[in-house]
Amino acid sequence: MCGIVGYIGKKRNAIDTLIDGLKRLEYRGYDSAGFAVINNNKIKTIKETGKVVGLQRKLQEEWSEYKDTSINLGIAHTRWATHGEPNHDNCHPHCDNNEKFAIVHNGIIENYQALKTQLELKGCKFNSETDSEVIVHLISECFEGDLAQAVAATVKKLEGTFGIAAIALEDSNSMVVARSGSPIAIGIGNDETIVASDIAALVAYTKRVIFLDDDDLAVITADGVDIRTLNNVPVSRETTHIDWDTTDAEKGGYEHFMMKEIYEQPTAISNSIRGRLDFKLETAVLNGLNFTPIEMAQINRIIIAACGTSMHAGMVGEYYFEDLASIPTEVEQAAEFRYRNPIIEKNSLVLAISQSGETADTLAAVKEAQNKGAIVAGLCNVVGSTIARETGRGVYLHAGPEIGVASTKAFTCQTTVLLMLALKLGRNRRLSGQDGMKLIKEINNISTLVETVLEQADNIAQIAKKYAKMNNFFFIGRGYLFPAALEGALKLKEISYVHAEGYHAAELKHGPIALLEESVPVLALANDIAGKDKIIGNMQECRARKSPVIATATIGDKSIEEHSDDIIWIPECSEFVAPIVTVVALQLFSYYFAYERGCDIDQPRNLAKSVTVE
Ligand code: F6R
């Protein structure tokens, strides 16, 4: 949450690079935006509430001639408000009282109130309600001529999480960054260095990226980076080559990132699968897990820790691991895992699933599991992200950047990878070569099936339009389609702001059925897989209460027609693949529904993509 960008170099105007970076990071928060640069021996800040376009407008109004000045150094921020409402004073960057230092911060300073009181007693004047502002006043207080030393002394006083970029008026040739819990990526260019919370802001300028570890501090110049510990001991961090393309992080002709990412799914899934199916040994190859066959055979329990959409993917994984590999599996909401004091036994595998690899609760679950001696692996999309590095073993999705706040391709790639992992674990146990090969063929066909769903887009759009005035929805499913129902409801509520609940179809009559009436449609996942007959019964119960029923059904399955008002057709597939393919249809339904209601699809209110606070 919150995106920070920093630029130093003579190759281009720092302000343009900062604004471009902010736009690419806007999915991390869009309550306000601002930047600070050194110009004419002054720190100049411009801030604006709302989105980055507002900041750009303000820049044109207040300083249209900025392009005539060479500006080599600056920091910028796009905010997801935690402390203090999204007004001008609370926008970052924050400056000290003498305007000699400026900082941007991503994270939460838990002891800010105590620090603020101490600083106020010394005469320091605060201009915002944010927790972040204490950082810049502390830097000013600790400064003895060396910004790196002042930042090190400051962060030693902080409790909580932070990614910080700081500049000092006295030194226009460097910037200092530090991290603890919030990501900092440093892009190494030629005669320029760019810093950001996320590689999405860097790939347009360089593919060479260094990720800071917790408690690292780095002095950034146009020539590169000098990384050290908070006690000034030099450390070296490896440079990663990023293979994302700039166009991957742009809309490419689509009106919204969400739609682009929905349509990218066949390719993204193929990329997740590429090189990972072994037709000879009839298994999957997931080298990043680094398990010997013996180690793998010893895994006797799997715990999946994740949040939101990733947790729903994990729920599908639970079915896979139990059905295909006979390994008892449970899914934990990551925050609950951390605070519930879970029982971890020898040979338990904890699998952390996270698209961003930065989700605070999932990261905390990883640390808790490691602390308790579990084998911990990550399933992440963002290369070099904190969870990927912290776990040290795992599987990357290779889905490319997911920018739309509503997660789409991450879900389908996560479930595909989980299916491959179940295949691998299954083949390591009782799954026969024949069944392994059958599964390999199904996995290989997922992209084609997703394409078939995408071909139904017009039909799905019509149905979404028909129901777009409704304000309450239920999504119901059973078995493999139960997690898909949860995911469908999550998609609808987050981008269209209507109340949507995902329920197990059988659970409906244990209370929620009381809510059913004409104005409450039920979206029933009635594909022709195990559980279909039962869900038909549930659909009848809903219709008896006058709820309109929209069903997903297998192409050619006429039996659903008499039990539903509208049908979204899904290609025939096994129960393993059904949740993956069906969710694509639900993503489209939510998209068109929200579109019809005029919602801000890529940046829904109150949300941010990377949830780096608890
Ligand atoms: C929903 C959504 C969120 C994320 C959740 C976890 O569309 O995007 O529910 O799935 O915040 O994020 P990651 O996967 O990055 O850990």
Image (tube, rainbow, N blue to C red):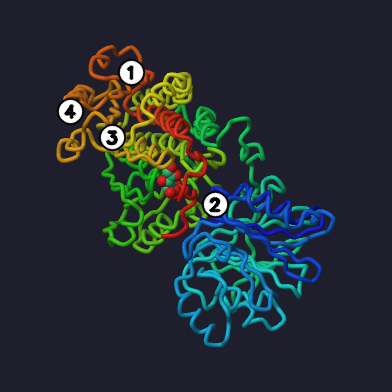
Which amino acid is tagged 4?
Answer: Arg
Query: Badge 3, how many Cα within 10 Å: few under 14, some, many 20+?
Result: many
- Residue 93 in percent (x, y) is at 62, 65
Q: Do the residues labelled 3 and 2 touch (CB within 8 Å)?
A: no
Res 275 seen here: no
Of circles 2 and 1, the one toward us is: 2
Locate residue 369: give its quadrant.
bottom left
Locate residue 372: give its quadrant.
bottom left
Pointer 2 or 1: first along the chain: 2
- Residue 85 in percent (x, y) is at 48, 61
Who is closer to the viewer here, 463 or 468? 468
Alpha carbon distance from label 3 to label 4: 13 Å
Residue 520 position (above or below residue 554): below
Of circles 3 and 1, the one toward us is: 3
Pointer 3 or 4: first along the chain: 3
Residue at x 61% of width, y 74% of height: 136
Which amino acid is tagged 3?
Answer: Phe
Q: What element carries label 4?
A: loop
Which amino acid is tagged 1?
Answer: Thr
Q: Are marks 2 and 1 in contact (CB under 8 Å)?
A: no
Who is closer to the viewer here, 490 or 413? 490
Query: Badge 4, how many Cα within 10 Å: few under 14, some, many 20+?
Result: some
State the residue position of label 1.
554
State the residue position of label 4.
545
Res 583 seen here: yes
Confirm or reject: label 2 Cβ below 8 Å from ligand 1.
no
State the residue position of label 3.
474
Mark identifier at residue 30: 2
Which residue sits furthest left? Answer: 510
Residue at x 71% of width, y 72% of height: 168
Query: Badge 2, how many Cα within 10 Å: few under 14, some, many 20+?
Result: many
